[in-house]
Amino acid sequence: MKTAIKLTLAVTLLMGSTSLFAQKFGRINTQEIIMSMPETKTMQTNMEAYAKELQDNIETMNVEFNTKLQDFQKNYNTLNDMAKEMKEKDLSDLQNRIREFQERAQQEYQKKQNELLAPIIEKAKGAIDKISAAGGYLVVFDTSTGSLAYFDETNLTDIAPEVRKELGITETPAATTPAPAAE
């Protein structure tokens, strides 16, 4: 009887270790993949053209400001007080518009870059998922970010309930309510 138990235990351990070693783990540098995609090169060309367009607009506004400033400085002694005030206000307004345009241009540039990059990232992720699933990888680590690029959720166990229990957390995340605002 003891021999049968030992044999069963040995087979179980052997099968468990075999299945552990059969798990495949992979790694990928997603950043490198994305940067080498032809779509990324096209996006970069488009972004360079867009940045030049924005920069040209800023330069035009700066030339206008400098021209008005030089005119104001040149004619300063011949202008009456009300004309000086109007010119100063005009210069101040133009300076504010330039600053606002620069801020909006930066935001628009970032927005456009994100819009153009999103489908490229999605395409790369789709390829990673497809190759990872087809290759039987349980987990693929992304070496560019130190995170997971892919994981087979069906073969993984969520240990959050046990961790919550260990920490004495009785509420589930969906059941949590926001803390009342301090008055």
Image (cartoon, grey):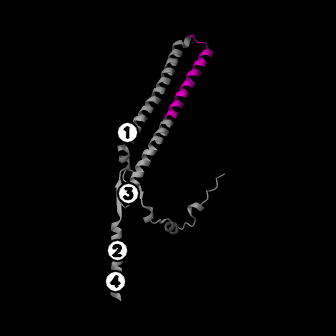
Q: Is mark 2 on a helix, strand or loop?
A: helix
> Residue 68, relative to residue 168: is it above or below?
above
The first of marks 1 and 4 along the sequence is 4
State how far apart marks 1 and 4 are (Cα).
62 Å
Hey, what amino acid is under mark 1? Answer: Lys
User: Which residue is the site of mark 1?
Assistant: 41
Q: Residues within 10 Å of mark 2 (few under 14, many from 20)?
A: few
Q: Is mark 3 on a helix, strand or loop?
A: helix
Percent coordinates x, y for residue 55 in the rendering: 45, 29
Percent coordinates x, y for residue 176 in the rendering: 59, 60
Give residue 87's mark. none
In front of the other: 53 or 55: 53
Percent coordinates x, y for residue 94 in the rendering: 55, 24
Please tell me whether residue 76 belongs to the stretch shown in magenta: no
Hey, what amino acid is under mark 3? Answer: Ser
**Residue drawn at (56%, 64%) of the image:** 172
> Residue 3, relative to residue 121: is it above or below?
below
Hey, what amino acid is under mark 2? Answer: Met
User: Magenta segment range?
Assistant: 78-105
**Residue drawn at (45%, 26%) of the image:** 56
The first of marks 1 and 2 along the sequence is 2
Q: Is residue 71 visible?
A: yes
Q: Which of the two marks, 3 or 4, is nearer to us in this view?
A: 3
User: Which residue is the site of mark 3?
Assistant: 132
Q: Residues within 10 Å of mark 4 (few under 14, many from 20)?
A: few
User: Which residue is the site of mark 4?
Assistant: 6
Hey, what amino acid is under mark 4? Answer: Lys
State how far apart marks 2 and 4 are (Cα).
14 Å
